[in-house]
Amino acid sequence: MVGDMKFGRTVKSLAKLLATAGYNNTIIFVAPQGLEMPAETLAELEGRVEIIQTDSLEDAYNANVVYWTRVQKEWFTDNDLLEFYGEIKDKFILTPEIADHFPSDTIFMHPLPRVNEISEEIDTDPRALYFEQMANAHSIRMALLSAMLVEDPYKKIEQSRLAKIIAGFRAMFA
């Protein structure tokens, strides 16, 4: 994961999901100094997933999936913080040159919307799945809610698109 770990809601949720998935995951948190993953979140992940914290993007160059986020200006309100924001906001920008350092099968994801942390040139890179990620988000949330609320979702929605999505989601974590 690359970007703002301190204030980013999506990175915390995704890290907790990966830790719960039961795989032998390693999560690399790449963040500017001062925006590292908070200690309380790290404590929740401890023992469930291997964690690497760094401020060097090079440490993530072998990642299978990179979840890129932006440094959110709205968290930096007073003048001292705005100066800090100005210093770090462009530290990690995914450009074609940076993307070339990652394996050809790495997946690039992003919660959207973006500001400038991912170059528009990356949009045509086959590894960039953030638009597909966005298009599937509603269906995935429906599937997750259904799986949590219905004892056996296949009985009630056997022929529906949602059942296929749930089956696909379960297969990912089987």
Image: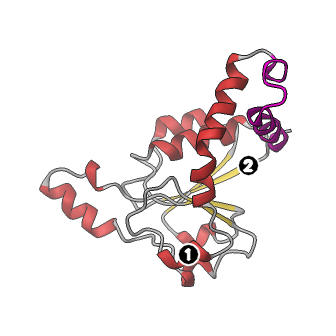
**Position above or below: 158 against 86:** above
Q: What residue is rendered at 48% in x and 64% in y?
A: 55
SS type, badge 2: loop
Q: Between label 1 and label 2, give the one nearer the viewer.
A: 1
**From the viewer's perspective, is 109 left or right of 36?**
right
Q: Which amino acid does label 2 sit on?
A: Asn
Residue that lies at the very extreme toward the top in this rendered image: 151
The CA span between labels 1 and 2 is 26 Å
Tell me the magenta residue range: 152-173
Dividing the picture into quadrants, the one containing residue 101 is bottom right
Residue matched to label 1: 122
Residue matched to label 2: 25
The dominant secondary structure in magenta is helix
Where is residue 111 shown, x and y percent of the image? 51, 52
Q: What residue is rendered at 84% in x and 18% in y?
A: 155
**Position above or below: 89 against 35:** below
Q: Nearer the viewer, residue 62 or 53?
A: 62
| N-term mark: 1 or 2 | 2
Crowd band around label 2 with a 10 angstrom C-alpha radius: few (<14), some (14–19), many (20+): some
**From the viewer's perspective, is 35 left or right of 163?**
left
